Every structure is written in structure tokens, then in C-alpha cells.
Image (tube, grey):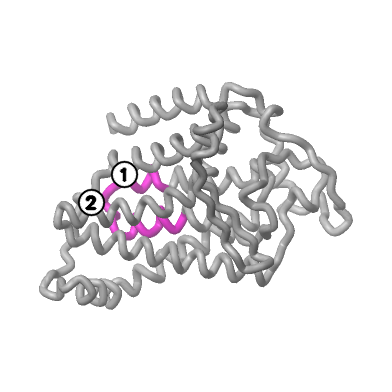
Amino acid sequence: MKFCRQFTIALILILTVYSSDSHSQYRFRTVRDTTKYNEKSLDVKIFRSFNNIHSSFVNGLVNVTNKSLILVSIAAPVGMFVAARVNDNHYDESSSVLLALSEGLNEGVTHILKTTVRRNRPYRTLNGVYLTDTTAVKGGFSFPSGHSSGSFVIATSLTLRYPDKPVLIAGLYAYATLVALGRMYWGVHYPSDVLSGMLIGAGSAALIYSLRAPIIEAKNKLFNQSERTENYSTSLNTPAFLISIAAVDLINNFLNSSSNKVLNNSSIRFSSSPETNSLHYSLNF
């Protein structure tokens, strides 16, 4: 618990520095055709309640966590796998594989639904939406929220594997909830998109977890580890794991917001185009 207090205080101080600019400097209004959307619907009302928040602190917090989820999704299973191999920890190694497969399943389901439903994002259909940079969602669809599903698949997968680590579970779900709610604050998702994303992410993790026995057996055969048994381990370093997630977020945000041209162009950026079933990736230095 002492670590949690120290971590929270440090994070708040860092985010306060990052969020020193006003809300209006980050966002702008757009005017869209609202003929097909009912402003009195619960979906739109909840969206407005989050999107209309005016807080420089919230703005900085959401910007930091929302810009780096894909990097976190890559770093989490890869980092766990490498650490497990170095420490010869069979349980953590299997957990990293299950996490990676859960993320892959989640991404596939989310992408299929986006290209099938093809729902426009709020900033394209509603008047007066507060909006941040939409480069990462240019050409994308709204349902379901990929950030919500991506964050909740990580939280659920590791919760199922480490049920006796309350600090880890609380930290992961707090992070996932912040990412998910931030999508409405950013003006790019409706509440129904976010809720659906949460369920898809959690469901993907639960499905892979239910198939863990044959998956781990196949993994053991692949790595010539057939003699090894699956014994529960609590060795996952909670402070190191949560700090690494925060570090990825903060470093990428620093690169994105830096006034230095070299640093600003050094960030890793992803964008998707469901209309053409393509994923664009660029690494700029």
C-alpha cells in the first residue's frame, strides 16, 4: 500500500506538469449534421457529460493514457515473456502468451465489428463536440471502442492469472477505465462503443483463459518444455509492471508534445483505416 501512495503522488505531480495548458488549447469545436441523432438519447447525454468536462488536469491525464495504448499492449506481453525467460518462471511465461493471444483475439473481433457496423464517430455526427487531434482515428469507425477493448483485455487477462494481487488488479482496472472513459472525453466514441469495447476485451481474455490448458501444452511443445508443469506463481513484480506501463505512457506523451522537432518526430504512431481493412504503422526519427 505504501508503494500505491507513492506511485499515485508521483503520477499526479507528473501529470500536473503535463496538463499545465488550458483545456481550450487542446480542443476545438466542430459542426456536424445531427439529423440522424437524438440529442435526448441516453447515449448522447452520457457522451456530452464526459465530453463537456473542462479540466486541464483531466485533459493531461487522458492525453497521456490514450496515446500509448498500442505500445502498452505490445510492451506488456513482450516484457513479461522476456522477464519470465530470464528468471526461468514458467507461470509468468505462460501468462504472457495467454495475454498476447487474448489481445490478438480482441483485436480481430473489434476490427470485424468496426468494419461490419460502420458507425460514424461522434465528432462527425454531432454539433459542438470538443475534439482533440484525430490523426490516430482518421478514417476509422466508432463501434466498438478499440481502446476500451484493448485496455480491458489486459486488465482481465492478468486478473484471471493473478487473482491474489489486489494492487495489480486495482491498478490495471483503474488504467483501463481511464482509457475507456477518455474516449468520450476525446470526442471519438459514444458510451455504447465504450461499454461494448469493455465487454469484448474482458470476454476475449476470459475465452483464452478457459482454453489455457491446451494453449500452454502447445506452447510447451513449441519450446521443448513438455516436462514442465503449470504451477501457480505470484512472482510477477506488481510495482515494476505498473511503473513500466506509466513509463511507456509518459515517454510517448513527452515525445508527442515536445517542442523539439527531433523529439517530436521520434514518437511511434499507429492509425487504422477499417474502410480499406488496413493498419498503418510509422516509426519516425
Circle 1 SS class? helix
Q: Nearer the viewer, mark 1 or mark 2?
A: 2
Direction from residue 185 to residue 61 in the image, left or right: left
Please, what is the three-letter code of the amino acid marked with disc 1? Phe
Mark 1 — residue?
241
At x 45%, y 39%, the residue is: 249
Magenta part of the protein: which range? 152-172
At x 13%, y 70%, the residue is: 228
Compared with 269, 106 (above or below) is: below
Q: How many marks?
A: 2
Q: Nearer the viewer, residue 280 or 211?
A: 280
Mark 2 — residue?
83
Q: Nearer the viewer, residue 118 or 280?
A: 280
Upstream in the sequence, badge 1 or badge 2? 2
Direction from residue 223 to residue 274 in the image, left or right: right
At x 67%, y 58%, the residue is: 140
- Locate residue 103, reporting x and y percent: 43, 62
Q: Nearer the viewer, residue 17 or 6?
A: 17
Compared with 182, 193 (above or below) is: below
Per the picture, the main secondary structure of the magenta-coloured stretch is: helix
Residue 170 among magenta residues: yes
Please, what is the three-letter code of the amino acid marked with disc 2? Ala
